[in-house]
Image (cartoon, grey):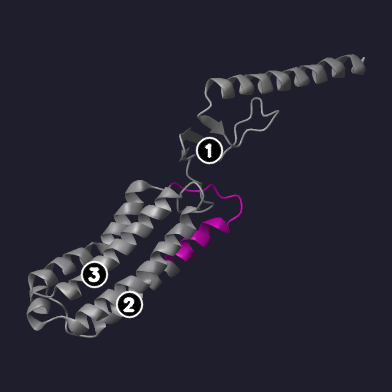
Amino acid sequence: MRCHHIAPLEANQKAQQRITIKCSRVADRAFPEFKISSWQPGDFGRYPTNSSIQFTKGRDTMTMSSRPLVGPGRFQWNAGGWFGSSLGSSAWMIVTSYLLVFHNQPSLGLVPAVGFAIVLFASLLLWARRDRIYPFPAMMGLLGLLAVAIPLVWIVVSSNGSPAALAAMNWPASTWPTVLVCAIAPALMIWFLVLERSVTTKPDTTKPESKIVA
C-alpha cells in the first residue's frame, strides 16, 4: 500500500519541477531583460531570503537590492538612525569649513570639508550595501572612520586656525576638549560592543527592536 502512495507523490514532484522549468523558460523569452540570479530548478514554492533581480538594458546592468540583512543583536538597519548618527557626528565639519573660508582661510577650510565628504560617502556606501553587510559591523566601520577623521580635523584646525577664526567659532583653548573629541568615538565603539554582546550572548532571548543606530 505504501508504494501506491509514494509513486504518485514522486510523479507530482517531477511534474511540478517540469512546470517550473517550462514557466521560467517562457518568462525568459517574454522578458529577456530580466534575470533572476538566485533561481534554481525545483525551487517551486520556495522564496530565497537574499535573492536579487538583474535588469539589463543594452550594456548596462542594474541590480534591484533585496531586503536589508537582519542583525543577530540589538542593532538593525534604520534610515533615520543611520543617517542621523552619521550626519550628526560630522555636520560640525561643514560649518567649520564655511567659517574658515569666511575668515580668509580657504585652504584650511578644505580640511573639514574633505573630512565631511569622506564620512558622508562612507555612510552612503555602507547604506547601499545593507543587503550584504550586517548593521553592527557597518556601524563599527563608520565609527572607526569617525575615530580617525574627527581628531584629525580638530587638531589641524586648532593648530593652524587664525585667532580671529577660532574666536568666531568659540573654539576652546584648553586641551581637555581635544582629549574628549579624540576619545568620544572609541568610547562609543566600546559601549555599542557591550550592548551588542549583551543581547547576542543571552540564550533564548528574543531580539529587541531597532535601537540607537544602524
The quarter of the image holding the N terminus is top right
Q: Which residues are magenta?
A: 191-209
**Mark on residue 8?**
none
The mark nearer the N terminus, 3 or 2, is 3
Q: Is residue 212 left or right of residue 3?
A: left
- Residue ranking furthest to the front: 58
The mark nearer the N terminus, 1 or 3, is 1
Q: Is residue 177 above or below residue 83?
A: below
Q: CA distance from mark 1 to mark 3?
A: 38 Å
Whether the residues at callouts 2 and 1 have beta carbons within 8 Å, the answer is no
User: Judging from the image, what secondary structure is the residue with disc 3 in?
Assistant: helix
User: Judging from the image, what secondary structure is the residue with disc 2 in?
Assistant: helix
Would you call the spot at circle 1 few (<14 residues within 10 Å), some (14-19), or many (20 or more)? Answer: some
Q: Amino acid at mark 1?
A: Ser
Q: Nearer the viewer, residue 117 or 87?
A: 117
Query: Residue 104 at what x, y percent from top left?
Result: 8, 74
Disc 2 target residue:
182
The residue positioned 69% from the left and 18% from the top of the image is 19
Q: Amino acid at mark 3?
A: Pro
The residue positioned 17% from the left and 80% from the top of the image is 172
Q: CA distance from mark 3 to mark 2?
A: 15 Å
Query: Residue 129 at what x, y percent from top left?
Result: 46, 50
Disc 1 target residue:
52
Q: Nearer the viewer, mark 2 or mark 1?
A: 1
**Mark on residue 112?**
3
